[in-house]
Amino acid sequence: MTYRRRASPLHAARASVACVWCGALALAAIVSWHPLVLAAVLLAALVAAPAAGVGREVGRFTLLVGVPIAVLFTVINPLISREGLTVVARVGGVWPIPELDVTAEAIAYGAVTGLRALAIIACCALYFSAVDPDRVLRLFRRFGFRSALTATLATRLVGTLAADARRLADGQRCRPGPPASRLTIVRAVTAGALDRAGDVAAALEVRGYGAAAAPARARSAWSRHDVAFALSAAAIAALAIGAQAGGLAGFDAYPRVELHGGAGAGAIAAALAIAALAPFLDRRGIAR
Amino acid sequence: MTLLRLEHVSYRYPGAERPSLRDVDLEIGDGEFVVLCGLSAWGKSTLLRAACGLVPHFHGGRFEGRLVVGGLDTREHGPSDVAAVAGTLFQDPETQTVMGSVRAEIAFGLENRGWSAAAVARGVEEAALALGIAPLLDRPTGELSGGELQRVALAAALAGRPRLVLLDEPTSQLDPVAGDELVWLLRRLNEEWGTAIVLAEHRLERCLPAADRVVALVDGAVACDAPPPAFLAWAMANEPSLATPAARMFSLAGLSPLPPGVKAARTALRARGIEPAPPAAPPAARPRRRRAKDSALSFERVWFERRGGRAVLRGIDLALAPGERVALMGRNGAGKSTLLRHANGLLEPTRGRVRAAGRVGLLLQHPGDVLVADRVDGELDVETLRRFGLDHLADRHPRDLSGGERQRLALAIVTSGEDRPAAVCLDEPTRGMDRLHKAHLAETLRGYADDGIAVLVATHDPEFAVQFADRVVLMGEGEVIADGDPHDVLAGGWYFATETARVCGALTPEEGAALIGERARR
């Protein structure tokens, strides 16, 4: 999954604001336990993705990475949790698996945890697809540029290594006789990565990286999209934190499943989704 | 004014047995276009790396003498300081890209120098406009072609308006069209903005017409420093593998001075009353269908259609007889590599079929991908190494071998084995290779053919195709658009033609010299 500039309000917003907006959405999923609020965050991320022109990328990543993790949480928690009062099944009892009670509360807790993970993963996917990493890197330039650049290059090297591994695998298929062991391939990929790292380091040097000076602070006027997404991020954070602090959208799994807040939780979830998606309605000035 | 001055510079890489530079004295002035030439491992890259400060600051080793770039002594100033004076471009565009978007890539060097945001924005715009890459500014660097990426890397090197640009074989990874465009851009930079250029290059016929001087390195020392015609005369006398095909043709015909390019050659011929042939018509050789029966390798109506994408191969019909030597040519994206990958089953056709009379040895573009062991004798047993003349390298690490040695080893690996291959396919084997090594490779391939093995080589290099092939297949958009004798296919056109063909219609220097002699006698 890589960033690509698209004509969308989120892409048109400055990197700092887009970062904060994605962060606010993820924060809402982190602080909240109410399934309706979590569903609202997930929905907001999944609707925002096509509105930002990255629906396919975000949907694919959420499906391939998020859904298996969510399912894993839902399945694992009832098997390891000893809490909850409503036993729905009794499994095990045959060596080496001890007898254990599967409770409805443990299943609910696992499912809500899975939903939360899914929402956070969708927010991360949206961030990686729609926020320009080079502009984010520039944000960190004043604080720890070399660390940020190293992190960026290391992240990028993952893709390069994967491509190298595919090429090496093809190369091995061209050899007669039995194929080389996985260990041999991994060693060759690692050695290749060191070569590549050396080349990139040389390229950085001749581009003046070693003398990297503190950049002058750049000031630019806030666009309509900067303002809209900043307000949206503030609203999302306020709603999520306020609801949690005020007990308006709470969730307890043990000893019995309890949802707090009643209709208020639904209203907060709806408000959160509306606040998150509202900036996408204004599509003026989004193309570059 | 002198921009680059080397005084008695000698340099030895850490752990190296021999110095890579030996007592080099050289001066390059403002606005000069200097071509640096020499065989592989003769010190071109090392000289450029010394000029940009990477030697010795990045590579270590033992450095003697004095090197001053734009007033900066590299003993006291590292590559980051030198970057303000000299822009540098290496061979492989992929390893020079550090940022995600073209705009950020060009801005990177300027930001490192602490330029204001407005100055960075202006520098990016101007560099992009100068190199014609403004439409690419918001594209991710990961999506660019090799030619586009190399232009972006050049823009990044030029954005700070350096007075000197150092380029280490920047066209070696590019197809002829992109390579010619890059040299044209350098020429424009040199002529319009007075930027001094130092260009290391193997394919001299591409860049000599633009050069003011040629510096030839032999074993790390400057052996010749002269204008192109004088350099060519020196090359013919001392190192013929450095001479261009047109120069060799003139030399064989007994004409002098030797021409640095096609235009000069045609002008010189006209001045002697020899009318050069008009540009030949485009290839008339029609694709021919050959009988697949008894062939060593055949592609029968092979289609390769990507899921949700385009058809890369469109009904390819091609058969190679045992011992036949075929050059596969065409621009990037024409389907050459995809076709070769079908030859040994790396890819399966979506329609049609591929038949082979036995095993097919395939050497992909990067020979290093075949090599995985820590020692050469871990890749092949000593007996096989001896058979391929590689036994003296048995205890070396494959990554420490030169490009040519690595390729010979990889070729030995894919063609060795219990059963002799029916066909051998090579994908772009001459990238970054000097003329001498190309000649050795052509010899090796002829040896395979003499043993009855069909040889199919994808290449962008018409001179190499003429050197080894007895048949040339030209591909375009996944189809065979010409197939025939090299004289039929490579004597016409602009890109798919040898230099001598562009001068007088003859494919090789020898044929050209004979033709010139014949026309002179008329």
Image (cartoon, rainbow, N blue to C red):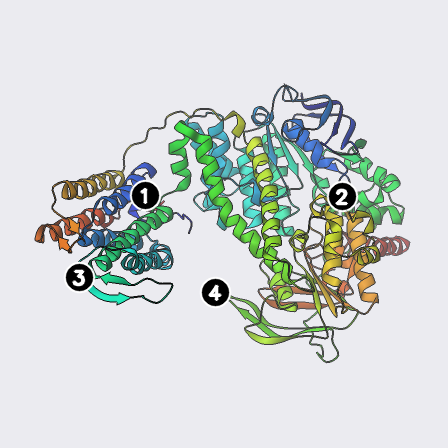
Amino acid type indicated by mark 3: Thr
**Real-space Cα distance between discs 1 and 4?**
30 Å
User: Which chain is mark 4 on?
Assistant: B
In screen coordinates, is B304 left or right of A249? Answer: right
User: Which chain is mark 1 on?
Assistant: A
**Real-space Cα distance between discs 3 and 2?**
94 Å
Measured from the top left, where is residue B139 in percent x and y? 45, 46
Q: Is residue A181 above or below residue B12?
A: below
Outermost residue to the left: A263
In screen coordinates, is A259 left or right of B214? Answer: left
Residue at x 44%, y 28% (from the top left corner): B119
Front residue of this view, candidates B246 and B329:
B329
**Real-space Cα distance between discs 4 and 3?**
53 Å
Q: Residues within 10 Å of mark 4 (few under 14, many from 20)?
A: few
Q: Is residue B451 visible?
A: yes
Measured from the top left, where is residue A37 in percent x and y? 19, 51
Q: Which residue is mark 1?
A: A12
**Real-space Cα distance between discs 3 and 1?**
50 Å
Do the numbered discs 1 and 4 sit on residues whose CB atoms are within 8 Å? no
Which tag, 2 or 4, sits closer to the chain's start?
A: 2
Which of the labelled discs sits on residue A86, or is there none? 3
Q: Which residue is mark 4?
A: B309
Which of the labelled discs sits on residue B264, or is there none? 2
